[in-house]
Image (cartoon, grey):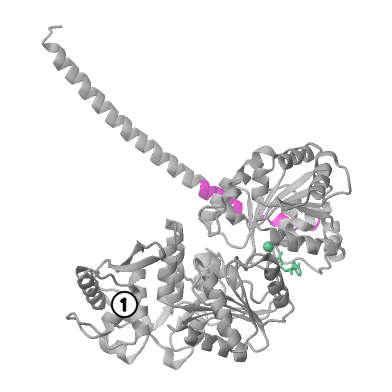
Amino acid sequence: MDEEDIPLKIGLIESEIYELTRKREELTRRINRLKSQKDELQANYNLKKSLEVDETLTNVDYAWSKNAQKVLEEKFNLKSFRTQQLAAINATLSKKDLLLLMPTGGGKTLCYQLPAVIDKGMTLVVSPLIALMQDQLINLRKLGINAMSMSSTTDKDAKKAGFQYMSKGIGPDLKLMYVTPEWLAKSKTFMSSLQKLHERGKLDRIAIDEVHCCSQWGHDFRPDYKYLGLLKGMFKDVPIIGLTATATTSVLLDIQNMLDIPGCTILRAPFDRHNLNFKVVSKPDKSDDCYDYLEKLLTKTFKDQSGIIYTATIKDSSEIMKGLRARNIKALSYHADLEEEVKTLTHTKWLESKIQVVVATVAFGMGIDKPDVRFVIHYSIPKSMETLYQESGRAGRDGKDAQCIVMFKLSDYMKNSGYARSKVEVKNAFSVLEYCLSLKHCRHYLIGLHFEEMEIRRCNSMCDNCKKATKENNHLQDYDVADANVDIHKLITTSMQGDKNLTVAKLVDVWLKPTVKIRKPGISKQQAEDIIGHLLIKKCLTEEKNYTPYSVNCYLRCGMTPESVVISMVSDKSLDKYLKIVSTDKKRQLDGSDDDCVVVIAGEKPCTSNNKKTKR
Ligand code: ADP
Ligand code: MG
């Protein structure tokens, strides 16, 4: 080869390398796309399989069936199984891995405690809170079932006895061992004893309570739950039973993955709680007005009845308590900063109905089991639909009607969104905003929709939206707010040019008394806030976080400006004057509904489209 030809040759090789690299990258991309397609298909296939109904699980001719009924009656003093309890018990006794979804208060505990009594060995129970474990231990002791818990606070002798039983079988048979995931992840002695128990053939099953804490997609993610993913590898033949009240498809898939039990059986108990009456009210601006509202509820509607008020911060929880006590209401606060004894005392007083209401943060949480809670009020909107559902679910465990009221103010949503630390949390806060602003649909339907409930039942006036639909003066009207949106954008832009940022409250102020040239709305403050809320939902407005050393401020920014933005609000003269009315068919059918769903007709009774009487 001539020397002059070499650079040319190199050039040719380089371009061939370039071309091949490009092709390789393209192929890698295609492979990755196919891989994720395959994973998604596989996951959905697994999930479908998991959810397939296995009729045999409700059979009563298993080897243990007679004994199970006997233990139910004689040991647990219960008459019959509730929906899905028998299937869950049969599944775990047949050594199947299982995820059990049951609403709060549905009776998940029995599904691992009863099998623990029937089997010869020990059931390991992973539970996220020490208080929860203690509650259960007290109950088990009353029933004469031998159980213990282990955590960093357990005393030495008790630990030693537990280890001796597990590794050598010394001492009385231990039916249930409760541990926190932190303890499991930390204690090597515990793990080695557990391995020995397994070698002796005495590790019957692993129950994981509040199993949604495994998933980053859930609302309660706990890093230590990750460690539980190793258990299946260590104890292949030991069935896992995971229990939770709330899990959407993505969370379920994530849990199956995390626990290494893909495609395991999933049992879902009916999720909707028919006896809960859901309602959203506008929250007044001033605390005193809020307390007056609560006073009226607690002394009239809920006179002599028990309930919980949930709020976002510790400060709020003590202030509301003070506000209520000043109005002669027996209230105590409950939050993470209180001493353990104070917490227990408050809880006990409430259980014994010596106080009417606990004003609590999320700390007053899992494991609360008072049957006659007649109301749960959210003083500030919850951070996610999961929290809303779970906290509301503490009402009406006795099956009698109870009310779940959310006090909604847009700025509370802005706070939740401002303090959100991940995309998931932002999305969670957003779904609650949508729930609160929705007037068109049955609240039971909206909640069911969020949790992908397969079978959505009819609410029969057990929510404010369905109830309002029966009232003459509560017609809903569709309005086009596109022009208002443009005006609002103008206000935001002008303020930003003047170096001023607008929060919701400030925007409402400048909008209702505009100094910039826009049309004067002539609507109420509440209506203005609701429109802004809807514009956030429609992405016509967006939020921007601004951090100060003490807090996070959430400012409004301009979003999209579509030609028309239709929202539904309660029909009203001032709105009619200011906004374009979109003429619509008055019949409103629930989204995605078929023949069998509720139809909410403004101005008429909610009814089913096949006109049958609704049943609850
Ligand atoms: P969760 O699903 O929230 O964990 P629990 O297991 O704490 O619910 O049960 C809630 C309540 O229901 C408890 O008081 C329990 O005794 C009661 N319960 C559970 N199973 C039954 C049953 N089969 N019959 C009657 N009551 C039951
Ligand atoms: Mg429970």
Q: Nearer the viewer, residue 402 or 89?
A: 402
Which secondary structure dominates the residues rendered in magenta? helix
Locate residue 244: give its quadrant: bottom right
Q: Nearer the viewer, residue 64 or 4?
A: 4
Residue 238 % position (x, y): 72, 43
Is 570 drawn above or below residue 149 in the view shown? below
| Residue 412 in the image, given as x and y percentages of width and height | 44, 73
| 332 horizontally vs 292: left or right | right
Quadrant the N terminus occupies: top left
The answer to whether 570 is drawn above or below residue 150 in the figure is below
User: Which residue is drawn at the image coordinates 37% and 67% (left, top)?
Assistant: 553
Q: Give residue 455's position: percent from left, percent from top.
A: 57, 67
| Residue corresponding to mark 1 | 506
Amino acid at dot 1: Lys
Q: If the picture is divided into quarters, which one holds ligand 2? A: bottom right
Query: Which of 504/498 is in front?
Result: 498
Looking at the rendered structure, the number of numbered marks drawn on it comes to 1
Front-lying residue, 37 or 337: 337
> Can residue 47 be seen?
no
Magenta residues, as a range? Answer: 43-62
Residue 27 located left or right of residue 261: left
Q: Which SS class for mark 1?
A: helix
